Image (spheres, rainbow, N blue to C red):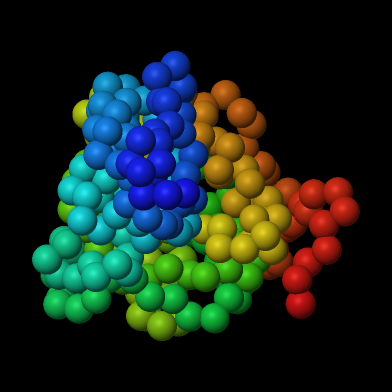
Amino acid sequence: MSAAGWKQWGAKFKGCDVIIGNYNGQAWPENMREDFVKFVRGGGGYVSVHAADNSFPEWPEYNEMIGVGGWGGRNEKSGPMIRYREGKVVFDNTPGPGGSHGPQNPFLMETRDPEHPIVKGLPLTWMHPGDELYSNLRGPAKNLTVIATAFSPQTKVNEPLLMAISFGKGRVFHTALGHSANAMQGRGFQNTLTLGAEWAATGKVTIPPLKADELPADHAAVRPPPGFAPSK
């Protein structure tokens, strides 16, 4: 898109219940940023998927929406890192860059707020297929609830990977899962994305959660789309 075209372009949020984003690219035009803030603050829903938390490091309202993010020059000035230690959320202000991950391996997800509508009824632990396990995410971390974490072999701490954030009258579901098509075939990713999107849109969840036999802890349950061939 040309510079002029990009400046004039803007999505229309009015009439939507929820916006789902995995965008990590060029900054949006000012009019689109203003409309998006107005939409979420006024009661709209937003779902930030994986790399969407890499976006817009210089946009204060967006960083407040997603709670924490990584890369793009984020550091201690962006806000604290969030850790889950000894049964509680800890804010870590240690200086350093925001955002890192190791190789794409399976990892165990652990629910930390089992009464939250997004995960209520889900198994307390379940295995997620090979994915980037984001760590050292930083940000304002305002009005943020840690829903689920995974232990990072890199940082040796439990990193928040599923979060819920209040922004004005709006609701934001932040999932750091879903780097690749292989990761997105995980049933846990699919179910929490669906549940989180409904919660962000309505504040309630009516979609049934997966049960323990559908979402085990000893191996990753997957549901590839028809004709899907995993990458090697």
Left or right, residue 178 beside residue 92: right
Left or right, residue 224 beside residue 33: right
**Image point 66% across, 42% down: which residue?**
210
Residue 187: horizontal and vertical position, in percent? 68, 51
Q: In the depicted view, which residue is nearer to us: 150 or 124?
A: 150
Question: Number of numbered discs present?
Answer: 0
Vertical placement of residue 75 versus 173, above or below? below
Residue 5 in sight from this viewpoint:
yes
Q: In the depicted view, which residue is nearer to us: 15 or 218?
A: 15
**Image point 15% across, 70% down: which residue?**
76
Q: In the depicted view, which residue is nearer to us: 212 or 150?
A: 150
Residue 83 in sight from this viewpoint:
no
Left or right, residue 229 beside residue 83: right
Left or right, residue 122 beside residue 165: right
Check the image and name the residue furthest to the right: 227
Residue 23: horizontal and vertical position, in percent? 46, 51
**Image point 73% across, 49% down: which residue?**
214
- Pick the quarter of the image with the C terminus: bottom right
**Image point 52% across, 70% down: which residue?**
132
Residue 189: horizontal and vertical position, in percent? 60, 51
In terms of image quadrants, where is residue 164? Answer: top left
Residue 145: horizontal and vertical position, in percent? 31, 46
Vertical placement of residue 29 versus 110, above or below? above
Check the image and name the residue furthest to the top: 15
